[in-house]
Amino acid sequence: MKTTIIIGAVGALLTGIAIGIQSTITSRLGSIIGDIKISLLTNFLGGVIAGLIVLFLFLRDGPGSWKIAGNVFGFICLSGLLGIAIVTGISFSLQRAGIAAGLATVILGQLALSIIVDAHGIGGVETIPLSFQRIMGLLVIGIGVLLILPRG
């Protein structure tokens, strides 16, 4: 296996752990102050921190390194809006389905879309064709999600 794939997998695993931690915190706080409030506050405070980092990098690297094409800016805005929807959805879903079942279902949704993105090369990387193995992998994960969902 290529070193870059292993490094990517380790990075993805660590990111998954971070998502699990953030999701647990968000779900708990969402039950206390509300799903939409926790989402907006999480994204706002994350934006403030990101803004300070951007300001630091802007001052360090100069304005030339921050030129962004207009069509890219629209996608950045869409990504930010999706971030708000994601944190709200996580807070809402995990309170009702549980952390493990909720995150497993989120991952299933991510995988289903990602297989389509890979098959069409939309993600900016080499196209990975839709195959029987990939469909079966998705099906196995779907069965796993059904087994993890709480009964009651």
Image (tube, rainbow, N blue to C red):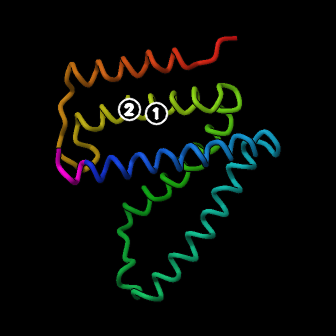
What is the x, y in percent for residue 1? 17, 44
What is the x, y in percent for residue 127? 18, 40
Residue 43 drawn above or below residue 57: above
Residue designated by label 1: 107
Instruction: Give the residue type that dot 2 points to.
Output: Leu
Q: Looking at the picture, tell me which residue is in the foreground, 61 or 102.
A: 102
Crowdedness near tag 2: few (<14), some (14–19) or many (≥20) residues, C-alpha within 10 Å? some
Q: Looking at the picture, tell me which residue is in the foreground, 114 or 79.
A: 114
Which residue occupies 38% across, 32% down? 111
SS of the residue under disc 2 = helix
Queried whether the magenta region covers residue 119, the answer comes back as: no
Residue at the top extreme of this rendering: 152
What is the x, y in percent for residue 8? 31, 51
Q: Which residues are magenta?
A: 1-5
Which residue occupies 53% across, 81% down? 55
Queried whether the magenta region covers residue 4, the answer comes back as: yes
Q: Looking at the picture, tell me which residue is in the foreground, 6 or 136.
A: 6
Residue 13 drawn above or below residue 107: below
Mainly helix, strand or loop, the magenta region? helix
Q: Which mark is residue 111?
A: 2
Which residue occupies 58% across, 30% down? 100
Looking at the rendering, in which quadrant would you find the C terminus? top right
Residue 130 drawn above or below residue 56: above
Instruction: Give the residue type that dot 1 points to.
Output: Ile
Which residue occupies 38% across, 66% down? 70
What is the x, y in percent for residue 22? 61, 48
Q: Looking at the picture, tell me which residue is in the foreground, 59 or 19.
A: 19
Do the CB atoms of the residues marked 1 and 2 lie less than 8 Å apart?
yes
Q: CA distance from mark 1 to mark 2?
A: 6 Å
